[in-house]
Image (spheres, rainbow, N blue to C red):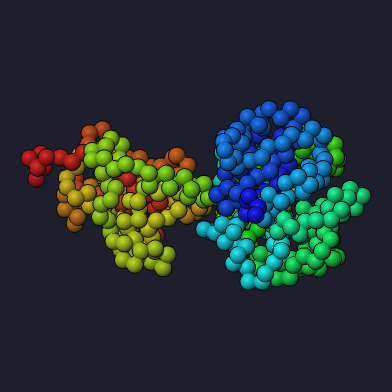
Amino acid sequence: MARYRFSVVACARWESPFIVEWLNYYRSIGFDHVFLYCNDDDPRELYGTCLPFVLGNDPFVTFRHYPVQGEQLRMYSHFLRHDRDLTEWVGFFDIDEFLRLPPGLTIGQFVGGIGAPADCVLFNWIFFGPNGHRDAPGGSILGDYTRRQKIIHPFTKYVARADVLTGSQLHDVATGNGFWHSPISHVDGPVRVVNAIGEDMSRYYEGFPEASAAFANDPGRSAALLATAMVHHYAFRTETAFVERAKRGLGGAFGDQTIWSDLAAGAGFASFLAGLHEIEDRSLAHFWPDLLGKARATTIPVTGQPGLPASRGKVATQSSISAWSAGSSPEADAIRALNGVIDGRGKFHTDLDDVPWWRVDLGAVHGISAVKLFNRMELPAIAARANRLAIDIGFDPDRLIEVFRRESEAPFGGADGQPLVFAPAIPIPGRFVRIRLLEKNYLHLDQVEVYGEALPLASHP
């Protein structure tokens, strides 16, 4: 029996800054192991970065150094000859490729849920651009790069049953190979191949690329594929990457990389970049905020613990609910802004009210020392709806006093570390805190945090 169910085989050259996010991503979507071939001249930097994944009794990564530059087929052949039997399924994904599955599904659940039995599932590429980043911003690939081409690329990657990957043609350099895009014409026996929506793909590469591109971009099929599973290809993570692709070497499979450095030096570079940024695609942008938000579930609740909002776990309500509300009542929708999950997404949503508002009841009078508002971050236009707002505080929900007003043309942030913070010089006594827009609009925020200490009864009415 195979040791692993789903594995990835990858070749890496100059990928140390990106490898940790990539490894964590594939582990989080259900892959059991990565066979990682380092193609750097000196393997120590990448090896040191990968140490947490390499060490231990059951490491997530098998690390190997292949010293000959650009010999991708040789590295994959090494895996097929020595380690193929260790895994039931395998995919060949580069470090700039992230397989996007339907939210909440692992690779095992996804493959098991495809209607037709298959030996291989093909996933099309979609190309993302550098998003205006000349140099790497140093954050998350998935969060920093959210604009892509409109069309689906005809090339595919796949996951396949490892036992179908047999035959001398898999190792034949003379054929031009590229079996990691599709195994159909390279294996000895028949292979049942489908795409992400279960369609037969046995003849997909006949007439490549024109016929394949037309098939993938048929309007109905394109919409279905984009809504299901794709490979996000971040081939150009910065504008300088076009030059760096040639600088890293021109041996083996890297021999044609001068086309990218030549492009960067040419007059058509700006229009090429524009073609990589045709539409906004944030389908993976919230992956890490959602994953890291789970850390809050580990918080040990301690009464009076410094730093915890006084509003956490309290009762809230709002002026109305809408078609976009997650809660079925104003109370059920409003309380979602107090759950502590800061991920840039709207937690409550009023209707289009003349003066929409959201309010929390702290349960007792507090000396309120700060109110933090975390905005939605999906799009600037969405965040801008909260540009003009006020904060009201008081003892009676029907008689609150305005203590802060904001009228600005610039949206404030939230999950990016730039929430709106109102911190009075002296704590303001009050039990109720209301957020109120100053104009007719929708009110929706990610989180509201109210800080302060409960006051003794003698100190307030």
Q: Residue at x 7, y 40 (%)?
A: 458
Q: Quarter of the image containing the C terminus?
A: top left
Q: Residue at x 74, y 67 (%)?
A: 192
The N terminus sits in image quarter = bottom right
Residue 214 in picture, x, y percent from top left: 77, 67
The answer to whether 168 is drawn above or below residue 269 in the figure is below
Front-most of 170 and 356?
A: 170
| Relative horizontal placement of residue 422, taking residue 111 as reference (left or right) | left
Whether residue 268 sits left or right of residue 311 in the image: it is: right
Query: Is residue 326 found left or right of 206 in the rendered image?
Result: left
Q: Is residue 167 visible?
A: yes
Q: Can residue 391 be seen in this snapshot?
A: no
Q: As drawn, which residue projects farthest toward the left?
A: 458
**Image: 275 above or below 425:** below
**Residue 314 position within the rendered picture, expressed as x and y whole percent measured from the top left:** 25, 52
What x and y, as percent, mark residue 459? Answer: 10, 39
Q: Nearer the viewer, residue 313 or 353?
A: 313
